[in-house]
Amino acid sequence: MTEVGIKELLQAGVHFGHQTRRWDPRMGRYIHGERDGIHIIDLIKTERLLQEARDFAAETARRGGKILFVGTKKQAMDSIRSWAERSGMPYVNQRWLGGLLTNYSTISKRIERLHELEELATEGQLDLLPTKERMSMQAELRKLEYNLGGVRDMQRVPSALFIADLKTEEIALREGARLRIPIIGLVDTNCDPDPVTYVVPGNDDAIRSCELVIGTIGQAVSDAAAEWRAAEETRIAEEERVRREAEEAKRRAEEKAKEKALREAEAKAKAEAEAAAREAQAGAAPPQSAPASAAEPAGAGSQSAPASARPAPAEGSGS
């Protein structure tokens, strides 16, 4: 980040204020003196306050906050657009639309309409419409781009405002102060610095002065926003890696659970089959035969008795 010192501020003419008769007494603490009827701004204070404003802007962008760059005067409008686009921040450099901050719910609907018309124009659907309707929608698109083109990607009220000229951007200043949004302002000697959170005393009528202050703030915001985007990409990649690992672990756990359930089912089926086979084998076996001594009839023993046990015949019966 390039350091801006007293020399750069002098070369850019930041120290030149307005005529002494057009000053705001509340800017007296930032005025060094007077020369040829023109107030001279104290550049020592400007250098210190510019550093504080730059640090705040960088810290805001480093946390992912959005800083709305505002500058519709011709001396600042080109620098406002260039640095805002470079840092990826919203900007207003054509016309401040009343209620842009305090009535953002309505403005957001117009931003949605802008995206809708841009999509129709990109896809070539506007060319298919009748001539009168096509011309009406094209005129609406041009008007929305003029008023809201710089804030088309602003999805919420910004975290901070940078205003290049408090007199010209009086409505933006009031809306920001009403919503208590921190304001960084390039404040000339004819402006009231009280509503501004971070005052940068300096010449807001010279192109070089505006470019220097806007570029200093814009460079800080651009660098910090790049750091935040890199950190976000790393965080998203890490979250994606963790998510994939969790999904892979879950898939493996489910596969192991399925394999375990399958093994248990196979073991159960095998046990049931073995039990069924044993029951079938037991049912098909022949009954055991009874012992021979128990199966013989009671009279069979007298027939098989030995001859010596038989009674002898009576004497003389044969003769």
Image (tube, rainbow, N blue to C red):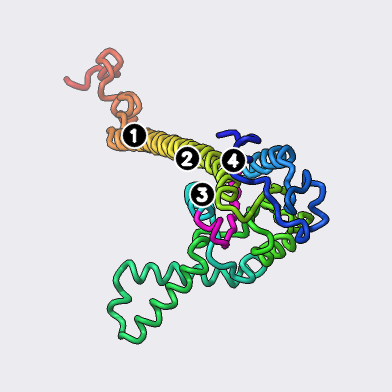
Q: Is 100 left or right of 239, judged from the image as shown? A: right
Element on which disc 3 rests: helix
- The answer to whether residue 261 of the structure is visible from this angle is no
Which comes sooner in the sequence, label 4 or label 3?
4
Say which residue label 3 marks: 83
Amino acid carrying label 4: it is: Gln
Please state the extent of the stretch shown in magenta in the rendering: 61-78
Element on which disc 4 rests: helix
Disc 3 to disc 1, how far (Cα)?
Answer: 76 Å
Amino acid carrying label 3: it is: Trp
Say which residue label 2 marks: 233
Whether 137 is drawn above or below 315: the answer is: below
Say which residue label 4 marks: 11
Q: Is 269 left or right of 241, judged from the image as shown? A: left
Residue contact at pointers 4 and 1, CB within 8 angstroms: no
Residue 156 lies in what quarter of the image?
bottom right
Which comes sooner in the sequence, label 4 or label 1?
4
Q: Nearer the viewer, residue 79 or 184?
A: 79
Where's residue 275, x and y in %?
36, 34
Amino acid carrying label 2: it is: Glu
Amino acid carrying label 1: it is: Lys
Q: Nearer the viewer, residue 157 or 13?
A: 13
Where's residue 104, x and y in %?
62, 67
Element on which disc 1 rests: helix
Whether 210 is drawn above or below 227: the answer is: below
Residue 154 falls inside the magenta stretch = no
